[in-house]
Image: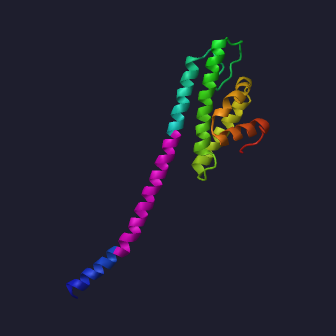
Amino acid sequence: MTIATTLDVLVKITQLIGIPVGIIVYARNKRKERIDREYGTYDALDQKYIDYLKLCLANSDLDVADMPKTNVIALTAEQSHRQTIMFLILLSIMERAYIMYKDKSDAIRQSQWSGWNAYIQDWLKRGNFAAALPMLSTEFDVGFCAYLKQMVTAPAATSP
């Protein structure tokens, strides 16, 4: 066997093994990138939500936290204004969740969306939030506004 023949056989063996290995490595890297992106999406949204909770704590005189206050008092004009701003922040977070998770095909995003969908439905049952919603929701993504409108008119639905 000549050196040229030996080299030719080695090249073919390398191609035979190398190409599938390269495809497998590429697919694994793409999967890892997708998982990292999904985690980044989750983490960014989670951080916004935590920031909102910190604002709720700093504005405990308002009824803007996840757990409604049991002893609701009439708000002053200044408190009402702060409450409106807090609801705008909350709606912005909800809109981000809607855009990031709604209509996504993979299981992680569908799972996240089902949680956010339930969370939004809970907020829509809150009197102060529902009362502020018509004035606030017009400034957001058209699809998100349509989703909110559908949830208000058909609250039993689980997904638009």
Q: Does the stretch in magenta take in 71? A: no
Residue displayed at 78% across by 39% down: 156
Residue 41 x %, y %: 52, 42
Tell me: 43 left or right of 118: left
Residue 137 x %, y %: 67, 32
Tell me: 123 left or right of 109: right
| Predominant SS along the magenta part | helix
Residue displayed at 41% across by 69% down: 20
Range of residues picked out in magenta: 15-42
Q: Quadrant of residue 57?
A: top right
Q: Quadrant of the C terminus?
A: top right
Residue displayed at 35% across by 74% down: 15
> Residue most toward the bottom?
1
> Residue most toward the left?
3
10 and 146: which is toward the camera: 146
- Count of numbered tags: 0
Q: Does the stretch in magenta take in 31? A: yes
